[in-house]
Amino acid sequence: MVKKLIVGTFLLFSILPLYAQQLQDKNEIQQVISNLFQGMRDKDQQLIEKSFHSEAVMHTAAQSPDGTKLGSNSVNEFINRVAVTPPETILDERIQDYHIQVDGDIASAWTPYRFYVNDGFSHCGVNSFQFIRIDGQWKITYVIDTRRKDNCN
């Protein structure tokens, strides 16, 4: 009985640091996503740029009458579009939930969202992010999103 208790205690204390690291990683990744969308709301180009790896790629699964098409733009194009938005226009992407998975120095996040322009609903969808940890910092390497106006429960 004592031997089982000792083994159980040892296992518990060997697993706790791993759990704590996973939780810390998930919190840091969630903060990167939050910073990205705070930068978009504030039109803060530096905050947006800090969220991305220098070689990041952005795509959209765009709906058209001919079916789904793959749209793309660079991070710089995205930053520039946000920067030229009139100051009185607020772009507000509200994340509904975070589903984050981490394995070592890579991670993914699935984030359903609702998008508002000046508090008016525009569209909804899902972002699928891929991350890499470089020099202790999580950076977005890839994002693809969906966009729709209906079925936004």
Image (cartoon, grey):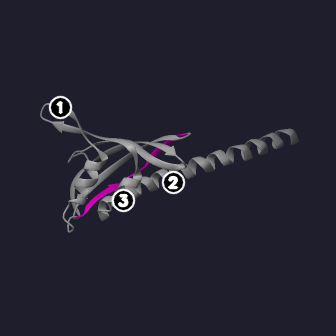
Label for residue 67?
1
Instruction: Decide: few, some or many residues near mark 1? Use Cα within 10 Å; few <14, some 14-19, many ≥20.
Output: few
Tell me which residue sits at (32%, 51%) in the image: 113
Instruction: Decide: few, some or many residues near mark 2? Use Cα within 10 Å; few <14, some 14-19, many ≥20.
Output: few
Which amino acid, mark 1? Gly
- Give the number of the mark in front: 1 or 3: 3
Instruction: Decide: few, some or many residues near mark 3? Use Cα within 10 Å; few <14, some 14-19, many ≥20.
Output: few
- Mark 3–mark 2 Cα distance, whole angstroms, equals 21 Å
Measured as percent of width and height from the top left, residue 37 is found at 34, 57
Instruction: Of the two numbered discs 2 and 1 on the same chain, state the one appearing first in sequence.
Output: 2
- Mark 2–mark 1 Cα distance, whole angstroms, equals 36 Å
Quarter occupied by the N terminus: top right
Q: Is residue 1 visible?
A: no
Tell me which residue sits at (37%, 42%) in the image: 56
Nearest the eye: 12 or 46: 46
- Seen as rendered, the residue at the extreme bottom is 88
Measured as percent of width and height from the top left, residue 50 is found at 41, 54
Which amino acid, mark 3? Gln
Q: Which residues are magenta?
A: 90-103
Residue holding disc 2? 27
